[in-house]
Amino acid sequence: MTIQDSFVLAWRTVKGNKLRTGITVAIIAFGIMALIGIITAISAMNQSLKENFSFMGANAFTIRYKEMNARFGGGPNNGDQFAKTKKGQREKKSNLDKEIRIEEATYFKEHYGFSRAKVSIYRRGGGNNELHYKDKKTNPQITLWGGDENYIAVNGYQLELGRNINNVDIQSGRNVCVIGSSVAAKLFTNKPEKCIDKIILVQGKPYRIIGLFKSKGSSAMLRQDDIVFSSLKNVRQYTNSNPSYQLGIMVNNVTELAPAIDEATEQMRKARRLIPTETDNFVVDKSDKFADLFIGLLAGISGAAGAIGMITLIGAAIGLMNIMLVAVSERTREVGLIKAIGGKRKDVRRQFLFESILISILGAVFGIILGVLVGNIFSLVLHTGFVVPWLWVLIGIVICSVVGLAAGIYPAMKASALNPIEALRYE
């Protein structure tokens, strides 16, 4: 009996026992679906995080006086900074508590001499703002930012309509603003493009809209279009403004990023008047830092997904082995007939192993298809492209093949060891 004959017999047996095959395939498929589905969803989240948190572009970085906080639930972010030690202890970074003053930020901007780099000084004017236009209002989640003429370019925004703030706006601090696309859609529902020169209320004060940002996209963790932007001098009037200024620097291309950061660090030390023995009391962050942080956290979820999938597959392997053992008992006469017409023990073993592997691979195929479809629901929610984790697809097929092989070895050995005469007499 050739390998092809064994495979054809195995395939016929798998097709002929539809109920048994269907149940076993379903068990394996759900295990693979759990694994591939979670991995696909995480891949979509990784892509979304990269797109959303790289809000300044790959060739830009930020200087702030302390680390950015990432909080999940709990109280508001009050700016306290902690670093985890290897023991899990949290130690306060006492050297990162000195706010960047406007004089220091201005000194840096005037003296930073890296080739054609753009420098922007900006300041957060408070979040959770509710904007009003006539009888319409936004949700209380709009963030007010104050900056200079380079804020838009450095932070990766583009103007769809209107103009950027100019020197007159910056020097006078008058109430003019550029709004995000989400704000325009909420306040000017039917025709957001008609927002230019309209008067809106920000914290109860009238502002004239001079520009509209193009949409950057939003996620549950970062609402980049829920923004209203004015000048630095204007934002100073609000008591809930962040007391520290930030610096954004954008270079021509990503290859210049490392030397630009080195020079920025040196220049900022001069602005902060640090002596050589003192450590930096400011932080330089690349725009994708938070994305890397969250992706690192998601890696733990990937491990948990793998554990869930493997536990399910172990259960499926046990179920498959039991079903194959039952098949040996049911087909004892068939085994005896194969041996009676010249079939060898290896032929019987091969046929049962092929059956087990075929069932496992069928389960893998259906599980992968379902897992990719289920996982890509997150792609639709997060507005990312269709994601297929090809590496895990290959791993899933290999795992299922191994499961099928492992589950089929003992039943195949048992079947091949049957005495042909006794098998033919079996009722």
Image (spheres, grey):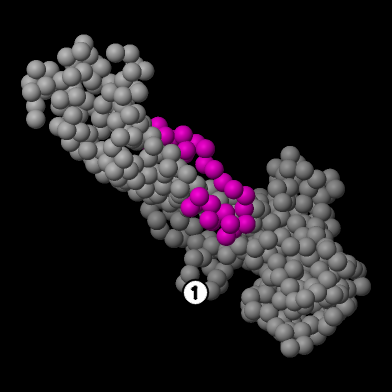
Q: Is residue 104 above or below residue 384?
A: below
Between 55 and 138, the one nearer to me in the picture:
138
Between 95 and 77, the one nearer to me in the picture:
77
Would residue 186 be seen by someone viewing this image from the given angle? Answer: yes
| Residue stretch in magenta | 373-400
Q: Relative to 62, is 309 on the left or the right?
A: left
Position of residue 274 measured from the top left corner of the image (x, y, whole percent)? 68, 56
Going 22% across and 38% down the picture, which residue do you hit?
Answer: 323
Task: Tell me, yes or no, whether the highlighted magenta stretch contains residue 91.
Answer: no
Between 31 and 336, the one nearer to me in the picture:
336
Residue type at the position of mark 1: Gly
Residue sticking out furthest to the top:
342
Q: Is residue 304 above or below residue 148?
A: above
Going 53% across and 74% down the picture, which residue do you hit?
Answer: 76
Q: Is residue 281 above or below residue 241?
A: above
Task: Tell me, yes or no, whether the highlighted magenta stretch contains residue 377.
Answer: yes
Position of residue 10 measured from the top left corner of the image (x, y, whole percent)? 31, 27
Position of residue 82 measured from the top left corner of the image (x, y, whole percent)? 50, 61
Q: What residue does disc 1 label?
A: 75
Would residue 290 be seen by someone viewing this image from the given angle? Answer: no
Q: Relative to 79, is 348 on the left or the right?
A: left
All told, the count of numbered labels is 1
* Magenta span main SS: helix
Residue sticking out furthest to the right:
168
Going 52% across and 41% down the picture, which residue do you hit?
Answer: 389
Between 357 and 382, the one nearer to me in the picture:
357
Q: Quadrant of the C terminus?
A: top left
SS at badge 1 = loop
Position of residue 250 measured from the top left corner of the image (x, y, whole percent)? 77, 52
Q: Quadrant of the N terminus?
A: top left
